[in-house]
Image (cartoon, rainbow, N blue to C red):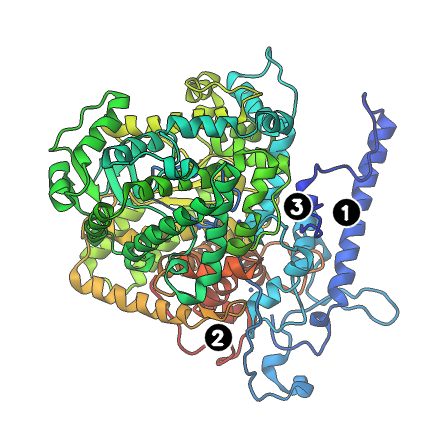
Amino acid sequence: MPGAPNPFHSSPQRSRPRSCCPISGPGTWSRVEQMLALACFLLAIVVIVLIIMVASSTSPASSSSSKGYNDTHHIDNDDSDTNNDDDDDDDDDDDDDDDDDDDDDHDHDDDDDNDDDDDDNPQKNHAVKVISQPSDGQYTIPDGIDIHGVCLTPGCVNAASRLVSTMDDSVEPCENFYDFACGNWNKKNMIPDDQPSYNTFSKLGDEIQVILKSYIEQAIDYKKDRLATVKAKQLYISCMNESQIDRRGLTPVLDLLKELGGWPILEGTSSRQRTATDVLDLLIKLYLIGQKALIEQWVSADDKDSSVNIIQLDQAELGMPVRDYFLHSEAASKRAVYRKYINDVAVTLGADRVQARADVEDMLKFETELAKITIPSEHRRDNEAMYNKMTVKELEEMVPQFEWLVYLKRLFAHVNITIAENEPIVVYAPSHFSRFGKLYQATNKRVIINYLLWRFMMTRINNLPTQYRNIKNEFVKSMFGSQADPPRWYECVSFVNEKMGNALGRLFVEDHFDRSSKDTALEMIHNIRASFYELLEEAEWMDEPTRVVAKEKADAISEKIGYADSILIDSELNKEYEDVDYYSDKYFDNIITFLKHSALTNLKKLRVPVDRTKWSTSTTPVVVNAFYSSTKNQIMLPAAILQPPFYSKDFPKYLNYGGIGMVIGHEITHGFDDRGRQYDKDGILVQWWDDIVIQRFKERAQCIIDQYGNYTVPEIGLPVNGVQTQGENIADNGGIKEAYRAYRKYIERQQKEERRLPGLLRFSGDQLFFINFAQVWCGVMRPQAAMNRIMTGVHTPGRFRVIGTLQNMPEFSTAFHCPAGSYMNTENKCSVW
């Protein structure tokens, strides 16, 4: 624990920003020009402030008859990436969140109060004074408001403009705070055609993409550019070189398919008989180019000994984003689109249409059987039950249908590591692998190879010429709702960022990141951690021994903020990419080069101790997200999320604590959610809670499960999966409490409230804290994305991340004077932390 284009995708987030009023050309400004520029700047601030005040004072909320407030994140995108070139594994056990929100109307019966008699209703009288605009057009400053107590810095003015333009003052905050805080967000931020959803995280991500584009579009300067920068630019050039990609056509992928032993579906009835040895050979070759199907296998820290890396095995992902799409009759249309997608790709590559149809049916039958033995995510939350350590020999005894020792021996031979039958491995969900072995033995090996190479082609379709990439459009539209491919530059920037995130991160940090933010974030972490200590002390359901150990774990949480210091050292940064060479005219080859490098790098970790000081390979500076690693007991805040609207050194504390402060609290609380609590302060999976305390925790977690399970996403008419999302919901509820307490402690130390925002003088600092928190989760999802989120995601849609947390928080109801029994101040409140 994140501008909309028109239908033709001319999004302001996807074009290079331009100055609306250039005031000088090249050269040095004269003294007069400098004075004029300063005057122009000051005048612009005044105009913006007046505009905000006008907008605010003429809104329904500023009238005397307003309705009832008196005085208001892995943080990980659950929506599938519809344009992902390949899935690079994150070697850490990270919980992250950035969220997608849905836009729904949640009706609630108001109290039997007479709306036309507000003056007699104490709940509907404003305790907060507002700027009013009399008939003579002159603004009146309320008594007690000092205009000198208004923050007029550019940071405050910009923040006020964002807050005002996003809010919908016609909504009663005590009845639906999400609609109040985010009611106008969707009107101003349409979903880009190429995305399944759009929210605060993705909007900031788009803005950062434009910045990164400006870096890597600069011509290569072999004298000045460091080697990592040169390689990043070469990679980008190769991706943008569509004429060369078109000239090469299908040759690169057909050559690679030949190296992989040939795709039987393309060979028709003349295809040779395939054996188990052929499957084994192919699995190894595919692993070495980053493709995993049938078996998910990687090397990372052992949950029971987090200082040691170990081989780990798990069930693999399926070709459609939702397991149930393979199993339920109502998803027949999804299966039809998927079937057509496979068939079209095969025929385009040269398969006979009749034979292709038969082969595709066999593949779908096989994948459906795979889906049946795949364990749903809501049944995978007990890490202790999922973790099963054994030797390779024991795995072969459990699943004798597959040659595990031969497979692992041959695979690790590529990095000169010897695997014996007593090699320890971790197997998640042994019941899946037992059933997998029987399915593997019973299935014609031609079908399995066809399926494996289809999954390979599925990830590589984006790397082919345009005419072939278009084949996937119907599939993407059906599964994710996206209407089009992203602009080519956007796709290529994303591609380079995925492959060389630290190279781009160096450019971003040097040019765009205020390094003092690191110190500020450290201070906020310290303050928010102190708030968590308070929650621990107040948790009456904990016994004292468990509380003491819990505090030790909280004390031991380490932090990574902004970026790894090593990326600022040229030799260290260049070393990260020294084993890869990219060519501006060989896009497809560049991708395979990277995937080989990534696969071998992961295998090499097996005999290397875990380095807890290193950043995760997927957590680069320009990721708009935040993370918690259970095995490292560590939180990570990349530089990209330390930007507005989450954070700015120019923001009042109530905005920073309501933004990045809540994110920090969320990540800290992940160490004590239903899964994080299973790990101790050293990141070791062990039961360190008393059985009675565990039962009490589960009772409180069940309250959260039931609460969120009663929220219905109107786009699809399905409820939130309270079990599947409980970890994120627990983290949200703890995070907002910790951030709010830390903010109030800051105010107590200062012994005065902070300056208010222009056009928002009627809101106190506490209320602006809650408004900024809510606006972190503003967003909208397409119905297909909402379905994927509900069926597979661990994050609750943003609307209910706001409503659910604040319904549980008395401090919110106090800040907005919400009457008991109102929708935002329900009688039953859930609390874990």
Give above or below for 475 relative to 104. Answer: above
Helix, strand or loop at label 1? It is helix
Give above or below for 541 relative to 826. Answer: above
Helix, strand or loop at label 2? It is loop
Task: Give the residue displayed 70% in from the left and 39% down from the top.
Answer: 15
Q: Residues within 10 Å of mark 2 (few under 14, many from 20)?
A: many
Q: What residue does disc 2 label?
A: 825
Mark-to-mark CA distance, 2 and 1: 38 Å
Task: Give the residue displayed 71% in from the left and 56% down from the top.
Answer: 758
Whether pointer 3 and pointer 2 mark residues with C-beta atoms closer than 8 Å, the reply is no
The C terminus appears in which quarter of the rendering? bottom left
Task: Give the residue displayed 38% in from the left and 39% down from the top.
Answer: 269
Residue 8 makes an appearance in the image? yes
Q: What residue does disc 3 label?
A: 155
Mark-to-mark CA distance, 3 and 2: 33 Å
In the rendered image, which quarter is residue 91 located in? top left
Whether pointer 2 and pointer 1 mark residues with C-beta atoms closer than 8 Å, the reply is no
Q: Residue furthest front?
A: 270
Q: Point out residue 236 in the picture as x, y percentages from the top left corner.
A: 58, 27
In the rendered image, which quarter is residue 123 located in? bottom right
Q: Point out residue 632 in the picture as x, y percentages from the top left corner.
A: 30, 40
Q: What residue does disc 1 label?
A: 45
Label 2 or label 1, whichever lies nearer to me, is 2
Q: Residues within 10 Å of mark 1 (few under 14, many from 20)?
A: some
Give above or below for 482 relative to 411. Answer: below
In this view, the residue in front, 217 or 409, is: 409
Q: Residue type at mark 1?
A: Ile
Task: Give the residue displayed 34% in from the left and 70% down from the top.
Answer: 703
Q: Residue type at mark 3?
A: Gly
In this view, the residue in front, 773 or 370, is: 370
Q: Earlier in the sequence, mark 2 or mark 1?
A: 1
Q: Residues within 10 Å of mark 3 (few under 14, many from 20)?
A: some
